[in-house]
Amino acid sequence: MSASEKARAKAEQAVGKAAQAAGRATGNEKLIAKGRAAEAAGDAREAKESLKDTGRH
């Protein structure tokens, strides 16, 4: 996994978790959903990069 892609995946996951927490604190369902989507995008990116790394070794 390239360092920049790994960092990007972790950043997306962190943004998603923060958005979910803010949404829960304010009762904003849209923000919770956006947070889940951002976290899922980060998870998908991380899985894709891990799969690419597995293919290289």
Image (spheres, helix red, strand yellow):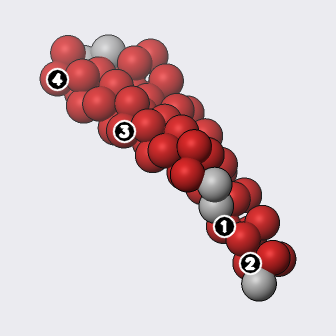
Q: CA distance from mark 4 to mark 1?
A: 33 Å
Instruction: State left or right for residue 32 relative to residue 1.
Output: left
- Image disc number at residue 50: 1
The numbered mark, 1 or 3, whose residue comes first in the sequence reads 3
Q: Mark 3 belongs to which amino acid?
A: Ala
Instruction: State left or right for residue 55 relative to residue 2.
Output: right
Identify the secondary structure beneath mark 3.
Answer: helix
Q: Mark 1 belongs to which amino acid?
A: Ser
- Point out residue 7 in the picture as x, y percentages from the top left corner: 49, 44
Disc 1 and disc 2 in contact, CB within 8 angstroms: yes
The residue carrying mark 3 is 14
Q: CA distance from mark 1 to mark 3?
A: 18 Å
Instruction: State left or right for residue 22 relative to residue 55.
Output: left
Q: Mark 4 vs mark 1: give the one in front.
A: 1
Q: Mark 3 vs mark 2: give the one in front.
A: 2
Q: Is residue 49 above or below residue 28?
A: below
The numbered mark, 3 or 2, whose residue comes first in the sequence reads 3
Identify the secondary structure beneath mark 2.
Answer: helix
Q: Residue at x 77, y 84 (%)?
A: 57
- Image disc number at residue 25: 4
Which residue is farthest front?
A: 3
